[in-house]
Image (cartoon, rainbow, N blue to C red):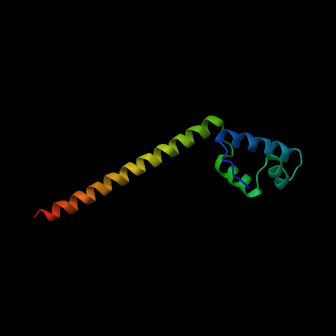
Amino acid sequence: MGRKRHSPEEIIGKLREAEVLIARGQTTPQAAKAIGVTEQTYYRWRREYGGMKVDQARRLKELERENQRLRRAVSDLTLDKMILSEAAKGNY
């Protein structure tokens, strides 16, 4: 069974749909099945995206990508510094 990565916009839409179903009296497992995900996925999505609007989810993903890029840059610079300090020790 293939996995599909849902966009934040799709996740928020599905969470809203599930909320409507639950408000109409369906159980959480029934609502999760109706939106096409497992109950575990529903709870994970609700924890991460619950109460968010679509633009907020987009911004969150942008910030996560930027944070990842900056962490990589810091890591690269730290490695460069360590290499240079080791090379400087060998010059004496």
- Relative to residue 47, is residue 33 drawn left or right? right
Q: Position of residue 11 (x, y in %)?
A: 70, 43
- Residue farthest to the front, as pictured: 1
Give whichever of 70, 87 is nearer the camera: 87
Give whichever of 8, 4 is nearer the camera: 4
- Residue farthest to the left, as pictured: 92
Name the image quarter holding the N terminus: bottom right
Name the image quarter holding the C terminus: bottom left
Please tell me whether residue 92 is drawn above or below residue 37 in the rendered image.
Answer: below
Q: Position of residue 10 (x, y in %)?
A: 70, 40
- Relative to residue 51, is residue 59 drawn left or right? left
> Measuring 41% from the left and 47% from the top, which residue is drawn there?
70
Q: Position of residue 42 (x, y in %)?
A: 74, 52
- Residue farthest to the right, as pictured: 25
> Measuring 85% from the left and 45% from the top, which residue is drawn there?
21
> Measuring 68% from the left and 54% from the top, which residue is drawn there?
44
* Residue 23: quadrant of the picture: top right
Total number of numbered discs in the rendering = 0
- Relative to residue 7, is residue 29 drawn left or right? right
* Residue 14: quadrant of the picture: top right
Q: Position of residue 25 (x, y in %)?
A: 89, 48
> Measuring 59% from the left and 38% from the top, which residue is drawn there?
58
* Residue 24: quadrant of the picture: top right
